Each structure stands twice: as structure tokens, then as C-alpha cells.
Image (cartoon, helix red, strand yellow):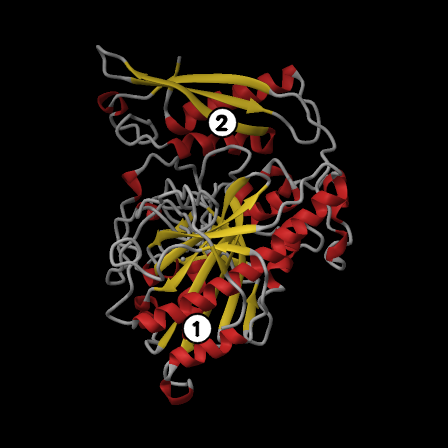
Amino acid sequence: MGGSRTLVAAAGRRTWPRAGAHAHVSYTASLCLRRGSQLSCRSSLTNQCWRAAYSSVFATPSTHQPSPTTTTTPKASSPATIHVNGKTYKTDSWFNVPANVLAATTRKLHLQKDHPISITRQILESKFPGPTYKYHNDFDPVVSTVENFDSLGFPPDHPGRNRSDTYYINKDTLLRTHTSAHEAALFRARESPGYLISADVYRRDEVDRSHYPVFHQMEGARVWDRASVPNGDIVAAIYEDLARLPTHDIVVEDPNPPHHPERNPLQAKHHTAAEAEAVAAHLKQSLELMVVEIFSRAKAAAVKQDPNFVDEPLRVRWVEAYFPFTSPSWELEVYYAGDWLEVLGSGVTTQEIHINSGVPSQIGWAFGIGLDRIAMLLFQIPDIRLFWSQDERFLSQFAGVSDNLGTLKRFIPFSKYPACYKDVSFWLRSTSAAGGNSKAANAHDFHENDVMEVIRNVAGDTVEDVKLVDDFTHPKTGRKSMCYRINYRSLERTLTNAETNTLHDQVTQALVGKLGVEIR
């Protein structure tokens, strides 16, 4: 069946809840993979990967969406039109894309030669060769709500549709939140048996060293068509393809059955047990080969630069999981530097996606992985903001690697500038006090992402992280108070007290002006 698999018992395996998933197939396969991978994913999906912190059920596609007034997302005066990658779009009351996020749509780090994100993409692609797999790396980031949500079965009231989580250009158009926005179109097009999508994706999010409003995902899929395989025997066709895959000699812990009626169910309405098991076998061998490649390169770079690095044998394990767009589903974990790391989400594609894409005779698998998280691990990059730096002290460290992956090496910090912490405390307006003030945040509809967005819009990448350090509700008035601690730290220079104080004053004024809070 192609490929040796050493199966050992997985001791102390984590039990994953069967809810709130998809990194990053994004909710990417995150919304997989970062809240991850859609097969999101964030890991932060815990994995920018498929663990999208969102669960979904397949519903009749609908273009209905929640009212834009369901969150306190600040509504600034917006332009009548905006331009993204040479195209013009009309805005409306849903528009909530700040200038810094719009500017990021031109960067395309996953295509920038010698950039860590692009190098990571290149390494992963090498294990999925053409013509079986076709690479799609230049899809436009602006998509419709139908593509991003409805085609994947997101119900009308799904939280991922809210303006608190998603950047809208207008009520029908947005910046994609996951690479799965292009999935249905690719299944329908039938251009190749398999594909990889790598792209920049956008989500309103917290501020810290592993989260950014723009990140990158890779989604992959492989399908077989019952109507075109010899004698209609799809199980035999899959095993023939499996036998052609390379082998590896790493230890694989995979103690669970191929499917389980409660924990990891078979799609019995559409697939036989033999079909699902064949798809799973091909999926696991394919992804194991990819993981061997990326972690072997990570270890080689570590050994090259750190004489004390302990080069232990690579171990991986498959863990049962839940994703709304695959079943059965698995996460792949790697034991690296003394700990089990969640790497990706995957599974047998939910048949409704093929049916809704107009190709009901297809069956296959999909996976999602967060490129930023893997790049941070591969190059030992400690702060996601560094990917967006244009400082030559950062970029020059990776020069030439795209042309010769053997020269890959770990990132060497060029400096660690001091942090400067500032607190901002404020009262949320009571519902009655907010009255007709549409921008006044109250405890009923307050969303933390709005605070993060205001701070990031003012201070940009000079903010390393923002954390809620205190909140309480006044026992007599019922008003709620919040206190956030902002860590101002530039990646490129030491900030002076004067400029930090000025930034903090601007942040405070923006919180009042945009959210209508009352500073304490």
C-alpha cells in the first residue's frame, strides 16, 4: 500500500472537543484553518490552521446575513469606492476595512522570493508534484459572501459572518477569511485531481506576537471521480495511487480506528467503510511525507547553528478531531524540541461540498495548514510582525534560500528593544446612557476585537501585544469597567518615552472617539 507505517500506542493523548473547529476545511477548513487553517487554520486555529474556533452545519445556501448593527464595530466615514489590486468596489454601511489592512493586500508575502512565508510554501508544495496537483497562489483576496460562507454551508447566523470578525467592503463582498472561499469553484472546475491554494487571508483579531489581521494559509485537496475510474472501482483506484507515493521510515502513532460512529463518524449516506478507509490511507501518507520534509529541514537548520541541539528521531501522531467540512477528521501532531505540536487539520471531505459544487461523483480528502505558524517554527521567528518588516536586517537573512533550500537557517535576532507598558481603563456606557449614540460601546454588545482594531490602527506594528488585565461591574450602577495593558515595543528601534506617551494619548482619544467609552 505504499509507505511503511509503524503503529504504536499513543500514551496520554489529548482529547479534543467535537466543536468549534476548522485554521485552518481554514472556517478555513479554518474559519480552517487561525481562529489557523480553515484548515485554519489559527494556533494560534490553535494553529492558525484548521482549528477555526467555529463550527458549522450544512444548510441551504443563503445570502441572508446578520444586521450590521449586531456589533459595535466602529463606523468611520468611508469612501464611496475603494481599489484593491486594480479593481474598484463600492462600499456601503458594512465597510470596516482600515487603511493598514487594505495596504497589506498588495504585499503577497507568500509570493515574495526569499521571504520566510514564500520559502515555507515552496517546501510544502514540493511534496505535492504536478500534474496531479495544481498550485493556485494568486487568487484575488476580495470574494463574495456566497463564496466565503454560503458555498461551504455556513448558516445565516454564524458568528464568522459578523463585522466584529470579518472585514467587509460591502454587505455582499469581503476580504476572504480563509482559502476555502475558492474550494467550491476548484471542485467544480475539475482542472486537476488535486490542488494547493496558498493565499493571504484576513480576520479581525487580538493583538499579540502570534496574531495579525493578515496571515497566510495553505489548503490542499485530492479527489477521485467514481465516473472516471476503471470499472467504477474507486477503492482500487485510490490504493493504486497510494502505492505510487514515496515511503518514509518515521514512527507514526495512529492507535484509533479509521472511523468511529460517535467520535469520528463515517459519512455512511455517501461512503462505504472501504472507500473512507482508502481515502484516509492516501491522506495520511501524503501529509506524513510533507511533515517529514518540513521538520527534517527545521532540524537540519537547528543542528547547523546550535551544536547542543539534540537531534531526536522524528515522531508524529494522528489525533481524532472535528471539522465541519470533513468526516472522519484528524489533526497531525509532531513531537519536536520536547513537545507535541499541532501542525494541521485534515479529513475526508464532506460530500455535501462536492454535491453543492455540482460534482456529486467526486470523493476525496482535504487539509489545511497555517503558513505563518509553520514559518515561525521552521525559522524560529518569535514575532509574527517580523514577517511584515522591510528591515534589511531581517530580509537579508533569507537571501538565496528560494534558489537553494539547503542554505536554510534559523533567524538570528538583530536586537531586542525594551518594552514600554501602558494601561488604559474605561467604562462601557450603560445601555440607557448610550441612547442614540450609535458609536457608544455598552456591555451588551461590546466586542474586544473593536478595541484591538482601534489600537492597531493608531499604533500599528509598534504594539507587541494587548491584554485585558482587569474588568469588573459596579455593584450599584451595573456599569462595566475594562482595563487593557498595551505593550509598546518596536521591532526596529527603541521608542522614546515622549513618543510612547504621544501614541498612548492618541490611542486613548481614538477609543473615546470610535467606541464612545469613558476613560477612567
The residue nearer to you, when weighing 193 against 148, is 193
Residue 130 drawn above or below residue 107: below
Q: Is residue 33 above or below residue 391?
A: below
Q: Closer to the camera, 13 or 17?
A: 13
Of the residues tagged 2 and 1, which is closer to the observer?
1
Observer able to see residue 131 = yes
Which callout, 2 or 1, points at the residue further toward the start of the chain?
1
Which residue in the protein does label 1 denote?
A: 223
Q: Residue at x 59, y 50 (%)?
A: 314
Q: Amino acid at mark 2?
A: Val
Image spot of residue 520 (x, y percent): 40, 12
Classify 398 as above or below 7: above
Residue 476: image quadrant is top left
Label 1 is placed on what type of residue?
Val
The residue lying at 38 percent from left, 48 percent from top is: 92
Alpha carbons under labels 2 and 1: distance apart: 43 Å
Is residue 26 visible from the viewing direction of this image?
A: no
Q: Position of residue 25 (x, y in %)?
A: 40, 57
Q: Secondary structure at mark 1?
A: strand
Q: Which residue is mark 2?
A: 466
